[in-house]
């Protein structure tokens, strides 16, 4: 005679019916799957990848900023060089005129003035060129450093992605192995029971089935009234008992 013999008086606390055993097995499988899902969500590798991703974004942004700064400075330097070239050309023209034989005193005076003014302007531009060159040197050094950091961060991110993928794959395999036993368990339960089980699980944090621990419900940990407890002990082994407090299926 199996443990599921429908003889109420044969029943004692701790002796489970087939229905109870199967429901408990289903709950164990699902709880295990939930735990694997939780572990998958909270993998150290996932945290490491989030950190690596943040660093990769940060360093890539710094790299872009440095490149843009370098490009601006190069363009400024080019403008300054072009202006200096124009000034030098104009100075050469003025000087040539100044030293020509047919220049009048009045024109010479004007040319001298213009030449001084151009020389002054050229000197300012050359100072600005030197400053721009120094700034460009620094920008190029910063750019090189930023590029190295961005490249290193990118390598780290790839490594972190691979590590996460591997860790996930291990857990997915584990989940697959656990889940493979589920259809058989579900098929051996009445459809209405499975529906009730799924509905309870959805509303009670994934735990639909609780064991009776002494007089307490193993789900909500509240103590059953003595009369209720006694009634449960006398109930048919295949009757689905309900905790009055939390609504979970109680296994005695
Ligand atoms: Zn309960």
Image (spheres, rainbow, N blue to C red):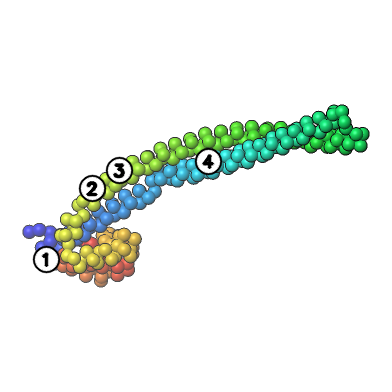
Check whether the beta carbons of the residues at disc 2 and disc 4 lie within 8 A of each other: no
Q: Which residue is mark 4?
A: 59
Q: Of callouts 3 and 4, which one flags the residue occurring earlier in the amino acid sequence? A: 4
Question: SS of the residue at dot 3?
Answer: helix
- Side of 227 where 116 appears, left or right: right
Q: Position of residue 157 (x, y in %)?
A: 44, 40
What separation in Å lies between label 2 and label 1 (alpha carbons)?
A: 34 Å
Residue 177's disc is 2
Residue 109 visible to an observer of this rendering? no
Inter-mark Cα distance, 3 to 1: 43 Å
Q: Say which of marks 3 and 4 sits in front.
A: 4
> Which quadrant of the view contains residue 237?
bottom left
Q: Residue at x 55, y 40 (%)?
A: 63
- How packed mark 3 is, by other alpha carbons closer than 10 Å (few <14, some 14-19, many 20 or more), is few
Which of the two marks, 1 or 4, is nearer to us in this view? 4
Q: Is residue 139 above or below residue 245?
A: above
Q: Residue 6, which numbered label?
A: 1
The residue that label 3 is drawn on is 170
Question: Closer to the camera: disc 2 or disc 4?
Answer: 4
């Amino acid at each position: 005679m199996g443990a599921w013999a429908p003889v109420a008086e044969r029943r004692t606390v701790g002796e489970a019916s087939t229905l109870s055993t199967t429901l408990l097995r289903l709950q164990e499988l699902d709880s295990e799957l939930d735990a694997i899902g939780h572990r998958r969500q909270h993998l150290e590798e996932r945290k490491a990848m989030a950190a690596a991703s943040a660093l990769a974004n940060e360093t890539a942004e710094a790299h872009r900023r440095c490149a843009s700064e370098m490009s601006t400075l190069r363009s400024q330097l080019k403008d300054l060089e072009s202006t200096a070239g124009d000034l030098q050309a104009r100075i050469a023209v003025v000087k040539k005129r100044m030293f020509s034989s047919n220049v009048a005193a009045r024109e010479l005076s004007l040319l001298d003035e213009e030449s001084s003014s151009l020389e002054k302007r050229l000197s300012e531009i050359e100072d600005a060129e030197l400053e721009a060159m120094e700034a460009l040197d620094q920008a190029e050094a910063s750019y090189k450093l930023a590029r190295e950091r961005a490249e290193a961060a990118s390598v780290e991110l790839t490594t972190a992605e691979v590590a996460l993928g591997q860790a996930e794959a291990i857990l997915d395999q584990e989940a697959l192995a656990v889940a493979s036993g589920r259809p058989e368990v579900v098929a051996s339960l009445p459809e209405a029971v499975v529906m009730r089980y799924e509905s309870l699980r959805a509303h009670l944090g994934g735990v639909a089935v609780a064991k009776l621990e002494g007089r307490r419900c193993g789900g909500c940990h509240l103590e059953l009234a003595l009369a209720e407890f006694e009634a449960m002990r006398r109930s048919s082994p295949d009757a689905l008992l309900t905790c009055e407090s939390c609504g979970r299926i109680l296994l005695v």
